[in-house]
């Protein structure tokens, strides 16, 4: 029971982290290596809006999500748009942006900015307290994560299937040339996808970070998790992303229960390498399989 | 003759004379710049001639460094023995680890190779071997600063001209074929995986040598051998120096490392700064310094009296 509940929570966390990355990659074929850094940035922004500017919690969250999506937009409009179609340069440039944001957050002594160093940045949970489900104590924040994850995934699914913007996003993902012929602006769609993806990273941060501390190092971990989920699920595949996040979430929780907490990351990357060995296109990766891989 | 030989002789002489003109502190920096130069060279070779963008340069450093460090600390072998063993051993290990990933290409390979150094760190902390998080200190160092410098400079020159020769041989043609159109290479009855393994082995030889040298330079090894620096700075050096020129990355590393060293006082600002250099070059001068200089140099065609 323990494993079942915490595994579900963990899987939803993985799905939340990965969904933004997967959206961006699926639509614009841009591996957004700045995903993890936007996650951390949104967390820090929310913290400092609440504690430095004494804002309302909901308002702080909204503003930091807006800022996250604007940053995604800027990254595409001013940097990645010049590098479309050069995968190496896209990776290097977005990774450089990510390092600038993450290391910039740790920087000190410029214009009185103190930098976020130290282990003391904690977001309040939305609602404190715990609850007893079938004999296991679960705090409300984890339940909110489950609810939030389900809502986000349903919302994204509805958005990409029933609105005009969402449909054009999928059109670009499936066949860019045909979509452009029908009047879909590929660059604008890529920009929209990057800003939605960044906002989703921010949303994941706001939901997940109350469980622990905020630290700049988490950016790298979040990036690795997002990549792991997307690779295992097959990059750019929706069902695959969700399936993979459940596979990883449960394998991590089980390995923690069996071997101890130190081994969870070993199991994580071991799983990735095993899946790549036997099925290089990921669990559900069908799209563009022949072109992308050998 | 002079027109062709000049740049090469200038580079070799420049590298050989450089240590004499520097003082103690900057000589040390030169050694570190040499390590980054070797890494940048191997990144450039893999990315531009084989088509494998390997973001995990830190893994080569880590494997090489740990092998030589452990041999030195536990068996007491001297650096003269451990560095060659670690170069070979580290390269074999890195290649074995990368073999499963060689079926991927493009960003998939980049992503997986980016995770491998982190994975190594997790394993070392989880198992608690090789000094775990504290690392192993008090390894033997090389005899003196002059040996240290000329070892790394010799390695750079050998690796640089070796790889230049290699990519112009038949095997280099196959490597470039794999980069440009792997299906065509496969259709010619050549196993791309076998050639990729060879290429990765060559690149990781260079990287592991740098790692083995690094652990004996500091006389210390730890988890920071797998640090992100070793993956990022070489890439910045490559982009700055000019991808695909092989000389460019070396020169880029020799320019960038002292720059980041001079900014050490600013703490994290230096990472931010070299990322800005990286983005600036990739956006506004994607050909890099060396391609530009080469073009300019060829405009002096009538320089020599024929």
Image (cartoon, coloured by chain):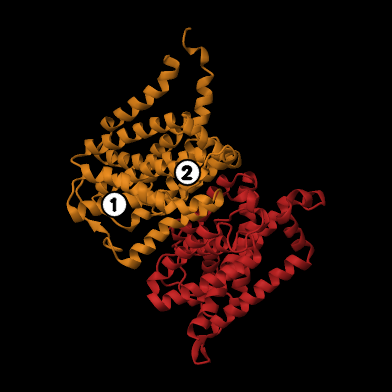
Q: Could you tell me which residue is drawn at 58 percent across and 81 percent down? A: A144
The one nearer the camera, B280 or B49, is B49
The image position of residue A118, as x and y in percent, is: 40, 68
The reply to whether the C-beta atoms of the residues labelled 2 and 1 are less than 8 Å apart is: no
For mark 2, what is the residue?
A: B194
Q: Quadrant of residue A192?
A: bottom right
Chain letter belonging to callout 1: B
Image coordinates of residue A20 in percent, x first then y, are 61, 64
Badge 2: chain ID: B
Say if residue A94 shows up in the picture.
Answer: no
Residue A85 spot, x, y in % from top left: 64, 45
In the image, farthest residue toward the right = A182
In the figure, A103 relative to B23: above or below? below
Distance CA(mark 2)–CA(mark 1): 25 Å
Seen at 47% across and 50% down, the residue is B55
Please name whichever residue, A75 or A275, is drawn nearer the observer in this view of the structure: A275
In the image, residue A259 sits, relative to residue A71, either above or below, namely below
Label 1: element kind: helix
Q: Nearer the viewer, residue A294 or B49?
A: A294
Of residues B279 and B196, the one nearer the viewer is B196
The secondary element bearing badge 2 is classed as helix
Chain identifier of the orange chain: B
Question: Which residue is labeled 1 in the image?
Answer: B67
Question: Who's red, chain-wise?
Answer: A
């Amino acid at each position: 029971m323990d494993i079942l509940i915490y595994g579900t929570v963990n899987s939803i966390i993985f799905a939340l982290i990965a969904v933004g990355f997967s959206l961006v990659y699926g639509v614009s074929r841009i591996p957004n290596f700045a995903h993890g850094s936007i996650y951390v940035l949104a967390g820090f922004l929310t913290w400092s809006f609440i504690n430095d500017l004494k804002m309302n919690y909901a308002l702080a969250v909204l503003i930091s999500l807006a800022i996250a999506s604007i940053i995604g937009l800027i990254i595409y409009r001013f940097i990645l748009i010049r590098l479309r179609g050069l995968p190496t340069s896209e990776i290097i440039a977005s990774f450089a942006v990510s390092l600038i944001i993450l290391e910039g957050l740790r920087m000190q002594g410029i214009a009185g900015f103190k930098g976020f160093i130290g282990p003391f940045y904690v977001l309040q949970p939305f609602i404190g307290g715990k609850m007893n489900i079938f004999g296991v104590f679960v705090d409300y924040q984890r339940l909110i994560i489950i609810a939030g994850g389900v809502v986000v995934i349903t919302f994204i699914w509805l958005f990409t299937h029933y609105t005009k913007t969402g449909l054009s996003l999928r059109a670009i993902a499936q066949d860019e040339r045909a979509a452009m012929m029908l009047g879909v602006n590929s660059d604008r769609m890529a920009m929209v996808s990057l800003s939605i993806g960044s906002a989703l990273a921010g949303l994941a941060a706001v939901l997940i970070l109350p469980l622990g501390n905020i630290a700049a190092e988490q950016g790298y971990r979040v990036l690795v998790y997002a990549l792991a989920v997307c690779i295992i699920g097959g990059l750019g595949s929706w069902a695959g992303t969700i399936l993979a996040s459940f596979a990883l979430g449960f394998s991590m929780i089980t390995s923690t229960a069996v071997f101890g907490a130190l081994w969870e990351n070993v199991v994580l990357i071991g799983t990735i390498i095993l899946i790549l060995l036997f099925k290089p296109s990921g669990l559900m990766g069908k799209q563009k399989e022949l072109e992308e891989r050998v | 003759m002079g027109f062709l030989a000049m740049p090469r002789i200038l580079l070799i002489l420049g590298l050989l004379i450089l240590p004499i003109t520097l003082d103690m502190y900057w000589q040390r920096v030169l050694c570190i710049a040499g390590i980054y130069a070797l890494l940048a060279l191997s990144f450039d070779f893999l990315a531009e001639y084989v088509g494998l963008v390997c973001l995990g340069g830190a893994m080569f450093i880590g494997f090489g460094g740990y092998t030589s460090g452990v041999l030195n600390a536990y068996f007491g072998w001297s650096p003269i023995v451990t560095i060659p063993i670690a170069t070979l051993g580290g390269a074999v290990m890195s290649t074995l680890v990368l073999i499963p990933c060689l079926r991927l290409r493009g960003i998939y390979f980049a992503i997986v190779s980016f995770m491998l150094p982190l994975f190594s760190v997790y394993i070392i902390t989880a198992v608690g071997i090789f000094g775990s998080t504290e690392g192993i200190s008090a390894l033997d160092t090389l005899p003196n600063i002059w040996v240290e410098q000329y070892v790394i400079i010799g390695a750079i020159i050998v690796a640089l001209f070796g790889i230049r020769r290699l990519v112009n041989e038949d095997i280099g043609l196959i490597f470039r074929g794999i980069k440009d159109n792997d299906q065509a290479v496969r259709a010619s009855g050549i196993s791309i995986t076998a050639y990729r393994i060879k290429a990765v082995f060559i690149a990781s030889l260079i990287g592991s040598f740098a790692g083995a040298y690094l652990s004996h330079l500091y006389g210390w090894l730890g988890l920071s051998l797998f640090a992100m620096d070793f993956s990022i700075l070489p890439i910045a050096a490559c982009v700055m120096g000019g991808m695909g020129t092989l000389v460019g990355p070396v020169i880029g590393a020799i320019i960038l490392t002292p720059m980041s060293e001079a900014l050490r006082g600013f703490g994290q600002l230096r990472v931010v700064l070299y990322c800005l250099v990286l983005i600036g070059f990739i956006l506004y001068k994607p050909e890099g310094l060396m391609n530009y200089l080469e073009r300019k140099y060829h405009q002096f065609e009538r320089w020599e009296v024929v």
